[in-house]
Image (cartoon, rainbow, N blue to C red):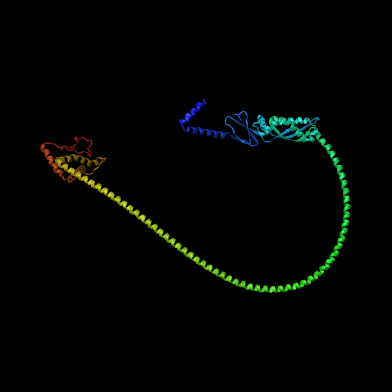
Amino acid sequence: MHALFVSALASTAGSFPLLPVILGGVAVLVLIIIFATGYVKSPPDQAYIISGLKKDSRILVGRAGIKVPFFERLDRLYLGQMTVDIKTEQSVPTNDFINVNVDAVAKVRIANSAEGIKLAAKNFLNMRPDRIAAELQDSLQGNMREIIGTLSLKDINTDRDSFSDQVMMKAAKDMDKLGIEILSCNIQNVTDENGLIRDLGADNTSLIKKNAAIAKAQADRDVAIAKAQADKAANDARVEADTEIARRQNELAIKQAELKVEADTKKAEADAAYEIQKQEQQKSIQTATVNAQIARAERDAELKKQNVEVTKQTLDAEIRAKADAELYRQKQEAEADLFRRQKDAEAERYEQEQAAQAQRIKAEAVRFAKEQEAEGIKAVGEAEAAAIRAKAVAEAEGIDKKAEAMKKYGEAAVIEMVMNALPEIAKNVAEPLSKVDKITMYGEGNSAKLISDIVGSTTQITEGFASGMGLDIKSLLVGALGGKLAAGKSINITLPENGSSGDDEDPTDGTEV
């Protein structure tokens, strides 16, 4: 099976050259993930126990390791020092049948060995230190109760070190089975129910007080004897000291007298020498004083001369500085005035240029507006002229066409057109009267005059039409009527009555001519 898998991989690798690289990358990625998720590092006060794949667990204390994810687990065991309070909850009788209560404190930790860690891991794995201390408290209390039963009250109080050592030795056997090491055990307090410890203390106290009183009396006696001896020795020493002092004082007085004579002699010699020296010094002082005065006068004269020169230079410097300052001020003012005038001129020129520019822009705008207006007027004029010209052309063409038509139709056509238009002309002349509800006329012959006006209006229209056409309507009508009469034909002309337009009237209602 393995050979088949290897051969399959080999054939696949031959087909796909990148497969080994991909498999290698996947393997490296898997190793990185395992390392990242399984890397652990235990602190010095804890033991990391890794178990799962192997029969024996791996123990890490203060070092790092790798835990295989999903196949191994990590547990922790606290290795630091723990404090266990050991108290007898009830009175425990000693070997002399005295009930006592003992309060002690033990310092313990997990044994610093692989075997001890394995034993402790079976009992205290993943427990907090206070929980481990609580688990050990009962066992240590039982061991201390057993040791109390083997000791007397006096032994417990007078030799607590031996008592604590016995407790440690007794408890060490049980603790070794749990993988626990006892570091120390200290007895804090021992009490009894009947106050026997206090009574034993009272007896010892009386004995101590008695011995102390005797020792005090003996000490006072020794002090008195020593004091008397000291006073006698002090008196003898004082007398001897006074005698020696008197002798020394006499010697001192004699010595002082000798020294005084010698001192007086020396003093007289010194006084004489002092006077001589004093005179010499006064002469030297006077000479030095005169020299000093001369030198001072010379220095004063030189100083005054220098002061005059300094004053002259100072005045000269001040006058020159003032003149320079005044000149600089005038120059600055002149430059400032020139600069101001230049700026004013530039500002005025700029304003004039801006005004000229504005005027130029305004003139350009007016000119452009006028040009646009002229263009518009020109365009309107051209359009109107074109319209008028087109209208005139059209009218002329119409007139020409009408004239040609008239020529073609002849007089008969003209007469027929005129006759056909007469009713419409009469209708349009009489139409305003049809819209009047009522007309009141006064005098005689007003109705005849109304008819005469209508006929006159019609006549004017026909005459205007004949004048515009260049035709003699009357002659044409007379000729036409004459022809009709000669042929024996009649002509019907229908006129509206009573001011009616004749639109809806029957033609038979008119007058026949």
Whether residue 240 sits left or right of residue 267 in the image: it is right
The residue at the far left in this view is 486
Q: Is residue 467 above or below residue 4?
A: below
Q: Residue at x 86, y 63 (%)?
A: 251
Q: Nearer the viewer, residue 483 or 324?
A: 324
The residue at the far top in this view is 1
**Quadrant in the rendering for residue 428:** top left
Q: Quadrant of the C terminus?
A: top left
Q: Nearer the viewer, residue 133 or 40?
A: 40
Give the tally of numbered discs.
Answer: 0
**Quadrant in the rendering for residue 438:** top left
> Where does the image place residue 499, in percent across and percent down from the top left?
22, 39
- Residue 227, visible in the rendered structure: yes
> Where does the image place residue 159, in percent across and percent down from the top left?
79, 35
- Residue 456, visible in the rendered structure: no
Q: Nearer the viewer, residue 37 or 382?
A: 37
**Quadrant in the rendering for residue 196:** top right
Q: Is residue 122 above or below residue 380?
A: above
Q: Nearer the viewer, residue 272 or 510?
A: 272
> Where does the image place residue 348, in percent across and percent down from the top left?
41, 60
> Where does the image place residue 346, in percent across and percent down from the top left?
42, 60
Whether residue 43 sits left or right of residue 443 in the image: it is right
Whether residue 276 sits left or right of residue 30 in the image: it is right
Q: Is residue 183 above or below residue 392?
A: above
Whether residue 321 sits left or right of residue 355 in the image: it is right
